[in-house]
Image (cartoon, helix red, strand yellow):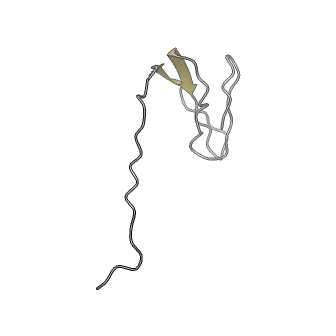
C-alpha cells in the first residue's frame, strides 16, 4: 500500500496505486502526472477526496446446524 507524503511524488511502473488505508478523516488533494515510456509528462490533474468516519453497529452471526446424515 502506498504511503502518501505531502510534497513528494509517488512513482509507479503501472497505471494505478493502492491508496493508504490510514488517511485521516478530512479532505485530501491528490495531483496526478502521467509519464509515458518516452518520458513525456502529462499536465497535472488535481482531485480532492473526502474521507469520512463510519460507524458499524454490532454484528450478529447466526449459525444454522446442518445434519450431515439426513435420511433421504
Outermost residue on the left side: it is 72
Residue 57 image point, x, y percent? 40, 28
Residue under the image location 66 percent in, 34 percent down = 2
Observer-nearest of 17 and 52: 52
Residue 39 image point, x, y percent? 67, 40
Observer-nearest of 3 and 36: 3
Left or right of residue 4: residue 56 = left
Residue under the image location 66 percent in, 25 percent down = 4
Identify the image quadrant of residue 21: top right
Reply above or below: 72 against 8: below
Residue 20 image point, x, y percent? 61, 31
Outermost residue on the top side: it is 26
Residue 41 image point, x, y percent? 61, 33
Reply above or below: 64 against 62: below
Q: How many marks?
A: 0
Left or right of residue 3: residue 29 = left
Residue under the image location 67 percent in, 41 percent down = 12
Q: Quadrant of the C terminus?
A: bottom left
Q: Quadrant of the N terminus?
A: top right
Reply above or below: 50 against 56: above
Observer-nearest of 4 and 7: 4
Amino acid at each position: 500500500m502506498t504511503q502518501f507524503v505531502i510534497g513528494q511524488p509517488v512513482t509507479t511502473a503501472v497505471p494505478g496505486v493502492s491508496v493508504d488505508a490510514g488517511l485521516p478523516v478530512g479532505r485530501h488533494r491528490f495531483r496526478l502526472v502521467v509519464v509515458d515510456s518516452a518520458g513525456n509528462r502529462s499536465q497535472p490533474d488535481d482531485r480532492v477526496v473526502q474521507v469520512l468516519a463510519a460507524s458499524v453497529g454490532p454484528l450478529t452471526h447466526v449459525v444454522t446446524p446442518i445434519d450431515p446424515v439426513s435420511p433421504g
